[in-house]
Image: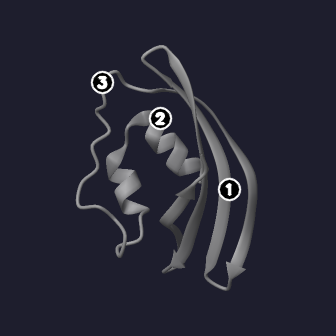
Amino acid sequence: MRSRYTAFVLRRADYLLATWHPDTRPATLDLEETPAPKWLGLKVLRSEETGAESALVEFVARYKTGGRAYRLHESSRFQRRQGRWVYVDGDQFP
């Protein structure tokens, strides 16, 4: 999770796509928003293995864009594939 957050900060779409489950991965990922978000921090609220090859990570990522502050609160599902954890999908909280 932390490495994917860092990839968002650095706008590394290649890394994000490489760590995304192939069944749910988009064909492309455009991180060139205008104005660009300024990422302020990541707080992992909980992480738990939900099976031998699956896990859940709940986090809050804070960022600013256009002078306004926002929070992304999500519960993300991950799956281990070929020894590596990949992002499957997530549920966002309001």
Dot 3 corresponds to which residue? 34
> In the image, which is nearer the foreground, mark 2 or mark 3?
3
Q: Horizontal placement of 26 versus 57: left or right?
A: left
**Amino acid at the residue labelled 1:** Glu
Residue extending farthest to the bottom is 52
Residue occupied by mark 2: 9
x and y percentages locating residue 92 in the rendered image: 56, 53
- How many residues crowd mark 3 within 10 Å: few (<14), some (14–19), many (20+)? few
Distance, label 2 to label 3, CA atoms, is 14 Å
**Residue at 32% of width from left, 51% of height from top?**
14
Callout 2 crowding tier (Cα within 10 Å): few <14, some 14–19, many ≥20: some
What amino acid is labelled 3 in the image?
Thr
Residue in view at x 29 percent, y 49 percent = 29
Residue 77, percent across and down? 57, 68
Label 3, secondary structure: give it. Answer: loop
Instruction: Tell me whether circle 2 and circle 1 mark residues in contact (CB < 8 Å).
Output: no
Q: CA distance from mark 2 to mark 1?
A: 18 Å
Which mark is on residue 36?
none
Q: Quick one: 47 or 67, which is closer to the camera? A: 67
Residue at x 40%, y 53% (from the top left corner): 16
Which of 49 and 34 lies nearest the eye of the viewer? 34
* Image quarter of the N terminus: bottom right
Question: How far is the residue under mark 3 from the one under mark 1?
Answer: 27 Å
Query: How many numbered markers are drawn?
Result: 3
Residue 86, x across and y down, in percent: 49, 67
Q: Which numbered circle lies on residue 58?
A: 1
Please report contact status of discs 3 and 1: CB closer than 8 Å, yes or no.
no
